Amino acid sequence: MVIVAWRWVVDTRVQMWLAQDNLAEASAWAAQTTLSPEAWDPLRKWEVLLLARVALAQQKPAQAVETLERFSWHRDQPADIEKTLEWMALYVVALFCAGKVAQARTVAARLLAMTEPEDYIRVYLDAGSPMKQALKMLLEAPPDSDACTEAISTSYVLRLLAAFEQEEDRLTRGSDIPPATTYKALPHPPQNAMQRGLIEPLSRQEQQVLRLLVGGSTYTEMAEALIVSPNTIKTQVSSIYRKLGVSRRAEAIAMTQRLHLL
């Protein structure tokens, strides 16, 4: 439990530094974080992804590519599909920014094939503007291009680009429209939820959990404070993430501040 709590703290801090363009702190963390393929710990996969994100923020796409490729054989674990998809999305962006366009197309084609059946969206939005440019590149590629060995679903790419436009519009206009969902496109949300910028409004209990979540409490600490089981807290946090349209604590904090929920 201590290790999990420490991981949450570090992940949240680095994600917040990146969201705030605080490259000094993020870079300092990356500089003192050492990972070795020879002494690989599967529990540290999240650090590989963070290191790649920091390198991209530092405008060092080649370093991001090298970081992701060093640990590429550890990404495909059946029980960790979300991390695999996140790894692939970051790899597409890193390759694209490094000028390795043909390779970026190939990886993007595989990622699209994996995510289209479930209509995943958020994993692309989380990769940022470079992913939007990479998706546009796919549409501009000649249909018979040898650079892309797998068929690209034009309709799916267009839906993803529309989601980027919606997200940018929402950030520009505030909370008048709901955020794109975490992974799948949900059906039309209720009108009152749309007005509040949420897919669904938070219950009173979820608001209490969110307050503790933003404050940095662990699941055990939240359970003790609210006199419920840790499993109940996990269920409520998952519900909060779904309603906020996020997938991790740092995003929940940022969305809470953006929508003035607390």
Image: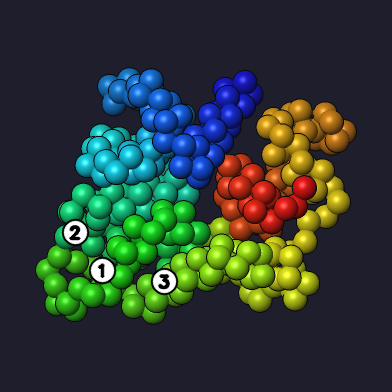
Location of residue 36 in the rendering, given as x and y in whole percent from the top left corner? 30, 23
Give the residue at x 38% y 38%.
54
Which quadrant holds residue 60? top left
Give the residue at x 66% y 76%.
188
Report if residue 170 is visible in the image: yes
Give the residue at x 34% y 75%.
153
Q: Identity of the amino acid at label 3?
A: Leu
Which residue lies most toward the left here? Answer: 146
- Judge from the rendering whether residue 250 lies leftward or rightward of residue 108; answer left or right: right
Q: From the image, tell me which residue sits under label 3.
A: 161
Give the structural element (helix, strand or loop) at label 2: helix
Q: Label 3 crowding class (10 Å Cα cut-off): few <14, some 14-19, many 20+?
A: many
Q: Tell me whether circle 2 and circle 3 mark residues in contact (CB < 8 Å).
A: no
Query: Which quarter of the rendered picture does the N terminus lie within?
Result: top right
Which quadrant holds residue 214? top right
Q: Tell me whether circle 1 and circle 2 mark residues in contact (CB < 8 Å).
A: yes
Of the numbered discs in the image, which one, if any, rests on residue 101?
A: 2
The residues tagged by marks 1 and 2 sit, at their Cα atoms, a distance apart of 9 Å
Location of residue 136 in the rendering, given as x and y in whole percent from the top left corner? 31, 70
Q: Identity of the amino acid at label 2?
A: Val
- Judge from the rendering whether residue 230 lies leftward or rightward of residue 51; answer left or right: right
Give the structural element (helix, strand or loop) at label 1: helix
The residues tagged by marks 3 and 1 sit, at their Cα atoms, a distance apart of 11 Å
